[in-house]
Image: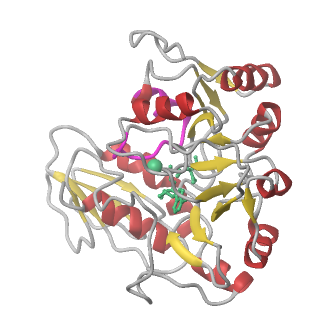
Amino acid sequence: MTEPAKTEPTRILPATDAAIAEAAGLLRAGQLVAFPTETVYGLGGDATEGRAVAAIFAAKGRPSFNPLISHLPNVARARELALFTPLAEKLAAAFWPGPLTMVLKRRPDCPVSDLACAGLDTIALRVPAHPVARRLLEAVGRPVVAPSANPSGRVSPTSAQHVAEGLTGKLALVLDGGPCAIGLESTVVDATGTRPVLLRPGGVTLEALEDAAGPVITPERDPDAPTSPGQLASHYAPALPVRLNAAGVNPDEALLAFGPPLPGAAVTLNLSEAGNLEEAAANLFAMLRALDQPGLAGIAVMTLPESGLGRAINDRLRRASAPR
Ligand code: TXA
Ligand code: MG
C-alpha cells in the first residue's frame, strides 16, 4: 500500500454522499480512513487485507498486535463471520446497532485476517449506530477493522480535528461527522458462553446488559474473569500527571470537575455541572485534551459515581492516572 508523505496535511471532508463513496473506494484499495462512530472516531482499514491491518498498527504506533474490532453494517453481515450463541442473538437484538462489541468464535471460513484477530480463534464484532459509519460500511461491502483513531496510549478522538492532530500524514482521509454523541468506546462482552463476560466497560452500562441478558461476570465480582487482551493499565494518558478523587486543588493544577467545582484551580472544565453521567462521558476525552497544557503541574479530577456510565468513565480515568 502507498502511504501519503508525512508532511502532507491530512484531508478532512464533511461526510457527504460523495465523500463517503470516496472513503469506501480508498478502504477497498487498502488505504486507511478515519470515520465517526457514536462512541469515538475509528481508524478504519479493510479487515480482510493483512497489509491494511498492519498499516493500522504502524500508524497508531501500537507496541503489540492487540486484536481489533471488525465493524459491520448489520447483524446479518456479522453472522457471516462468527458463530452466534443464543446469548449473542439476545444481545444483538437489544443493543445493535449501538455501542456494544461482542467477542464470538470465528467461523472456519471467516475472511478477516489473522493479524486483525491477533491469531485468536475468536473475533470481536460491532454494528455501530452512527449513520455515517453505517453508510460507509454498506458501501465498502467488507468488514472494516477500526481501533480508536489516536496514537497508541493517547486520549481517544471524539472529533475529526482530534484525529488530524494525532495522526497527520498517516491516513488517506478523515470523514467529519461532527462530535461523537457517546464519547467513550464500546462495551466489550464475551458472548461465547451462556452468561455475558464483561471484558471492557463502555457505552452500554452494566445495568443495561443485566436487564437484557441477566447476571454479568465482571473482574470485580470474579477475580479469575478475563479482561480484553491489551487493556494496558496506563492508557488514554494526557502528558500531565492525573490525580483522581481530588478533595482540594492547587493553584498550579487544572481541575476536571463533576458537579459543583472545587475552588482555586488554574483552569477548570466541568464534565457536567448537573452531575449527568451521559454528558460527562461525551465531554471526557475532549476535556482531558483541553486541560493538558504545558506549564501546569497536573490535572486533578473530582470523584464520579461508580454506577451507570460512571464505571466506564472511572475505568478510563484510572488508566489515565496509572504510573507510566
Ligand atoms: O467504540 C469502539 O469500540 C471503538 C470504535 C472505533 O468502534 N473501537 C475501539 O477499538 O475501541 P480498540 O481497538 O481500541 O479496542 C478493541 C478492544 C480491545 O480492548 C481488545 O482487546 C478487544 O476489543 N478485543 C478485540 N478482539 C478481541 C478478542 N478476540 N477477544 C477479546 N477481546 C478482544
Ligand atoms: Mg483505543
Image quadrant holding the C terminus, namely bottom left
Q: Is residue 247 visible?
A: yes
Vertical arrangement, residue 247 with respect to residue 181, above or below: below
Residue 164 falls within the magenta-colored stretch: yes
Protein image colouring: secondary structure
Q: What is the tally of numbered marks visible in this picture?
A: 0
Image quadrant holding the N terminus, namely top right
Residue positioned most to the right:
76
Hey, which quadrant is residue 150 in on the image?
A: top left
Q: Which residue is at 14% across, 51% downward? A: 252
Q: Is residue 258 visible?
A: no
Residue 130: where, in percent of width, then height? 73, 47
Vertical arrangement, residue 286 with respect to residue 315, above or below: above
Hey, which quadrant is residue 197 in on the image?
A: bottom right
Q: Which residue is at 65% across, 60% downward? A: 99
Residue positioned most to the front:
108
Judged left or right of residue 254, residue 144 is: right
Judged left or right of residue 46, residue 265 is: left
Residue 38: where, in percent of width, then height? 65, 50
70, 201: nearer the viewer: 70
Residue 203 falls within the magenta-colored stretch: no
Q: Which residue is at 44% across, 75% downward? A: 226
Residue 167: where, in percent of width, then height? 43, 28
107, 209: nearer the viewer: 107
Residue numbers of the magenta segment: 152-165
